[in-house]
Amino acid sequence: MNRHPLLRWGGHVLLLLCAVLGGAAIYYSTLQPDVLRVGAAVAFPALLLGSAWVRPPRPRQILRMGLIGGLGAWYVTDPPRNDRQWAPEYSIPADAWREGNDIHVRHVRNFRYRTPSDGIPAWYDATYPLDGLRSVDLVTSYWAGETIAHVFLSFGFADGRHLAISIETRRQARFDYSTIAGFFHHYELFYVTADERDLIGVRTDIRRERVYLYRLNLSPEVRQRLFMSYVGAIHDLISHPQWYNTLTDNCTTGILARAGARLRYRLDWRVILSGHTAAMAYDMNLLGPYDPVRFADFAALHAASHIVRAPGAVLGPDYSAAIRAHLPPPEGPGTP
């Protein structure tokens, strides 16, 4: 029996979509050796699309279901791992745990970058008093246009120290970075726990990205709860690795998940187009509190929150204080 033309064309489009996505899932996977990965990425769509020449219909359907079902079973059972050959900046994961009022963080990253791709590796261990947590800053870094930015948090303490934490892709040494790869099982999830001279400094002074820093308007209780959520997630990844996903588990959705944001905010279009995340936080009254006259709209606050580094500036011990010296200070009750 002949199917309606729209149904027939719909079936062709669905088959093509499965072929493209399946081939991409294999190509961007972590299969080794590379000849197997690339060969399978070519073979799957070729066999799936080539099934159109199989007659009669029943064997054709069985072949297609077997190919798609087999790929799906492999994909959902493909485990994330911690024991790969990682790029240097992701080679040593942080760990964090609580003892009484003290939060111990092992392997705070403190690279000194000579170029965007060449850094001197360094890590240190530190202990932070939970009751000394005084601020949480939202950092957005733009490398092209206004639509996409990398978003992360920095936690400030009463003694002047800052601990920056960024949710990122854990890249293997054998792969270059790829935006498309983040939609598939290619990167493990990684929490970069770093000195601000590393995590922010490489963006302001080495890569020369446009970096903005905003104070989050959170009560002491919420600040501590947010920080402890990060601590728990960092510790859990040591024994339970997870896949990174550009849509569902990325730098911005991870922040919202840690903050316990409602689902409607996690699905907001400004989460996917992360360059607008700070604007969303402004609309949610999560920034500041800043001078309501001077910063009556987000555009004014955004312009004033740009970190500007003087020519010849050095990534020294005073970096955290220096980048905040010309930023608008939060004002209002409860401001540290």
Image (spheres, rainbow, N blue to C red):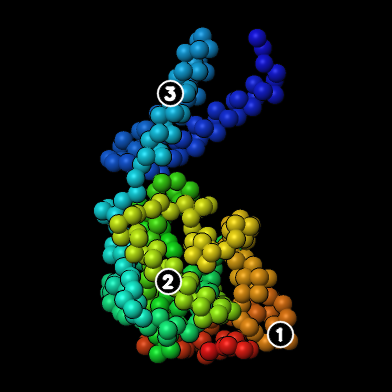
Mark number for residue 292?
1
Answer left or right for 52 relative to 173.
Answer: right
Residue at the spot 52% in from the left edge and 67% down from the top edge? 259
Sooner in the amino-acid sequence: mark 2 or mark 1: 2
Residue at mark 2: 228
Question: Which of label 2 and label 1 is nearer to you?
Answer: 2
Q: Position of residue 129 (x, y in %)?
A: 37, 83
Closer to the camera in the image, 138 or 286: 286
Secondary structure at badge 3 equals helix
Query: Mark 1 or mark 3, which has the lower sequence index?
Result: 3
Q: The residue under label 3 is which amino acid type?
A: Gly
Locate the N terminus by quadrant: top right
Residue 312 visible within the image: no
Q: Which mark is residue 159?
A: none
- Mark 1: amino acid: Pro
Q: Which residue is mark 3?
A: 66
